[in-house]
Image (tube, rainbow, N blue to C red):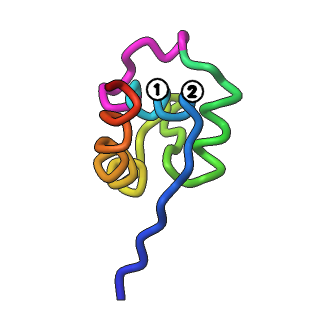
Amino acid sequence: MNTQIDYDLTPDQWETLKALRVPASGFSKLNRSVLEQLIALRLAVMIDNLPVMTPAGRTTLIRGSSRLWDVAA
């Protein structure tokens, strides 16, 4: 059985998760507090001192992207 969880992320969490799509892109510009929140949700991990999106983070970003379009409209 595949359990899928929808996350109600804040705009800052969405932006940080989107920023993690490109490895090592502007890591110093990421909000550390928000990054720690994503790590706590298991949407991101630290590997070799760099933040990396987890498979759950990718799924969340893909599934949530339609909601982001509604907000942008």
Residue situated furthest front in the rendering: 73
Q: How far apart in space, not on screen, are marks 2 and 1 (Cα)? A: 5 Å
Q: Residues within 10 Å of mark 1 (few under 14, many from 20)?
A: some
Q: Quadrant of residue 1?
A: bottom left
Q: Which mark is residue 12?
A: 2
Q: Residue at x 41, y 71 (%)?
A: 4
29 is higher (above) or lower (below) than 22? above
Q: Position of residue 42 (x, y in %)?
A: 55, 54
Q: Please tell me which residue lies in front, 54 or 8.
A: 8
Q: Indicate whether 23 appears above or below 25.
A: below
State whether residue 34 is above or below residue 59: above
Residue 7 in magenta stretch: no
Quarter of the rendering containing residue 61: top left
At 30% from the left and 34% from the top, the residue drawn is: 69
Residue on which disc 1 sits: 15
Task: State left or right for residue 10 relative to residue 4.
Answer: right
Q: Which residues are magenta?
A: 20-29
6 and 59: which is toward the camera: 6
- Left or right: where does residue 40 sit relative to residue 7? right
For the residue marked with disc 1, what is the amino acid?
Glu
Q: In the rendering, at what x and y percent does residue 26 appear?
A: 43, 12
Q: Please state if 51 lies on the left or on the right of 21 as rendered.
A: right
Identify residue type, mark 2: Asp
